[in-house]
Image (cartoon, rainbow, N blue to C red):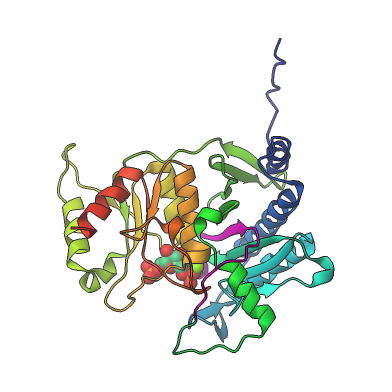
Amino acid sequence: TTKKRSAYAITTLTNWLLQQEFEDQIDNELTVVLTSIAVACKQIASLVQRAGITNLTGVQGAVNVQGEDQKKLDVVSNEVFSSCLRSSGRTGIIASEEEDVPVAVEESYSGNYIVVFDPLDGSSNIDAAVSTGSIFGIYRPQSECIVSYDEDEPTELDSEAQNCVVEVCQPGTNLLAAGYCMYSSSIIFVLSVGNGVYGFTLDPSLGEFVLTHDGIKVPPKGQIYSFNEGNYEMWDDKLKTYISDLKKPGDNGKPYSARYIGSLVGDFHRTLLYGGIYGYPRDAKSTNGKLRLLYECAPMSYLAEQAGGRGSDGYTRVLDIIPEQVHQRIPLFVGSAEEVEKLESYLKQ
Ligand code: AHM
Ligand code: MG
């Protein structure tokens, strides 16, 4: 006889992680890392929600290694993420969008896992209280990897820092886990540890992430495209043709709909649930696109594949690309399997 489940039963992220551990999908060290990431996300969520009150909107005044103006919340979120990971005692190396190079966690309190993250993605949306998110990926240390530096910007790294770069530059196929947390009308933590995609909504009255999206599958096709069309004139002709064709009425008599927040996590989350395609192509000015392979494109492509979708740079599977630089950019097309294949068929013509 099966026991009846109480109407009040909930599955918290903690319970879910312990279940994964019990099933040998993850080990106890990874459970600790994922738990500390969830804590960082709750802390960032609270900072984001109160930013307008606590004077945390606006720019910090510094520019990061990628030449972008750092927002105050970019800097604070990076600190929150880093300190949660360090104090977990289970991470060895951490690499962030907001840090020039990956850093090793002090030996006395370090562990094995490598965590790559973008602590607050889409931060141009912050001052208008529009959706943002945190993105992360987790790897195990490895020894083989190709490293090269941008010749225009020679870096002087000591051997420890060099080693961190080598360890961090792994292809997405090596990911042990990846996920994001979206700070929107709800705060949703979406995670895969290699056996599907699960979503947990923060219950503010409990302060806990509760399982709300069990085994997310991206629809094989979708009617929404999500591109920054302001860049249209700078795009390649094949891509222009693709976008123009999406605007022609299809079999159902309707063209595709356009939706673009300018926040990868929000645009990706919608694509995951509703289907369609998200794209950040290369253009005449940004010849490798805008998004970073390691902590934006690879984690999102991993989640897309785990949900039955695809992630491509237009020609190649994103997860097969071996990073040569920590902050390397690539074009990204991600979402419903058939929509990404359709895009590829235009670009490959
Ligand atoms: P960020 O990491 O500096 O926040 O930039 C990444 C963001 C993504 O969230 C979003 O998809 C993209 O930049 C939007 O760029 P654009 O404003 O060029 O459309
Ligand atoms: Mg980013």
Quick one: which residue is furthest to the right in this view? 108
- In reply to whether residue 141 is colored magenta, the answer given is yes
In which image quadrant can residue 37 be found? Answer: bottom right
Place of residue 278 in the rendered image (x, y in percent of width and height, measured from the top left): 36, 55
Q: Is residue 78 above or below residue 31?
A: below
- In reply to whether residue 42 is colored magenta, the answer given is no
What's drawn in magenta, residue-wise? Answer: 124-148
Count of labels shown?
0
Q: Quadrant of the N terminus?
A: top right
Left/right of residue 235 with respect to residue 138 in the rendered view = left
Q: Residue at x 60, y 77 (%)?
A: 99
Q: Residue at x 62, y 68 (%)?
A: 167
Q: Tell me if I can see residue 255 in this picture.
A: yes
Q: Tell me if I can see residue 55 in this picture.
A: no
Q: Residue at x 59, y 67 (%)?
A: 168
Left/right of residue 278 with respect to residue 254 in the rendered view = right
Q: Residue at x 68, y 68 (%)?
A: 93
Q: Quadrant of the C terminus?
A: bottom left
Quick one: which residue is furthest to the top in this view? 1
Place of residue 171 in the rendered image (x, y in percent of width and height, measured from the top left): 50, 60
Place of residue 259 in the rendered image (x, y in percent of width and height, measured from the top left): 34, 54
Place of residue 344 in the rendered image (x, y in percent of width and height, measured from the top left): 27, 54
Q: Is residue 216 above or below residue 189?
A: above
Foreground of the two, 30 or 229: 30
Foreground of the two, 41 or 161: 161
Quick one: which residue is furthest to the front in this view? 144
Left/right of residue 161 with respect to residue 169 in the rendered view = right
